[in-house]
Amino acid sequence: MTSAPWNTLGPLTVDNALPAVLCEELLRHFEHSTQRPRSYQGVVDEALRKCEYVEVPEHLAALVTAAVTPHIDTFFGVESYPVPGQPTLIYRYGVGAGFVTHHDEVTAVELERAATNGQPVIGGDLTTVLFLSGPDEYDGGALYFEQPPLDLRPAKGALVAFPATRDFMHGVRPITAGARYTFLSRRFVKSSVLSAA
């Protein structure tokens, strides 16, 4: 365990964080739900973000939370929990732009636009992304970070987690074939469990 502040650590990557059967159940939920286009800063613009989403029911979100919490809390040295009352989402990035470089802090313009556009506002201290499809199911689509420079195309069931701050600028490379499915949620940090050194 490191003594660095939790909000400077990451990204965390964990292979096989979700069992295949849960990935498949989440994908079935996506396919049997009404998909909506996802916005960036409250505006749907497929030149900036080519993505559809559905909300995840609480019973499925709870299964994901149980699987990932130990990995997240151990790596970041914190006690964390899902943001109460906030939806968790499944994203499908189809062929197209992916998602331009951005940060995960909620902005005033996003909040203002959400009041009229019906888009969910997803805020919190930590971002968690779980890959529901593997790299053999799509071309392109890497989750990239500017600092540290990193491109990730992990296996189905993998977890990627990082602080939802402006220090972790990231995006999704364009998808050139297939579709990339991910589960996204945000967590609050309740407390640091690191002992003072």
Image (cartoon, helix red, strand yellow):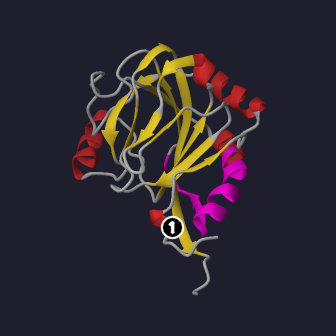
Q: In what quadrant of the picture does the N terminus appear?
A: bottom right
Residue 22 lies in what quarter of the image? top right
Q: Amino acid at mark 1?
A: Trp
Q: Give the magenta range.
A: 64-86
**Residue at screen point 51% across, 56% down:** 10
Q: Residue furthest front?
A: 149
The answer to whether residue 26 is above or below residue 163 is above
In the picture, measured across the screen, residue 15 lies left or right of residue 168, that is: right
Residue 78 lies in what quarter of the image? bottom right
Q: Is residue 66 magenta?
A: yes
**Residue at screen point 68% across, 35% down:** 157
The answer to whether residue 146 is above or below residue 27 is below
The answer to whether residue 44 is above or below residue 150 is above
Closer to us: 145 or 104: 145
Residue 129, position in %: x, y? 55, 42
In the picture, measured across the screen, residue 4 lies left or right of residue 146, that is: right
How many marks the image carries: the answer is 1
Element type at mark 1: helix
Residue 138, position in %: x, y? 54, 18
Residue 109 in view of the camera: yes
Q: Residue furthest bottom?
A: 197
Closer to us: 169 or 87: 169
Q: Residue furthest top?
A: 177
Q: Label 1: which residue?
A: 6
In the picture, measured across the screen, residue 118 lies left or right of residue 27, that is: left
Residue 192, position in %: x, y? 56, 75
Mark 1: few, some, or many residues within 10 Å (few <14, many ≥20)?
Answer: many
Residue 32 in view of the camera: no
**Residue at screen point 71% across, 26% down:** 24
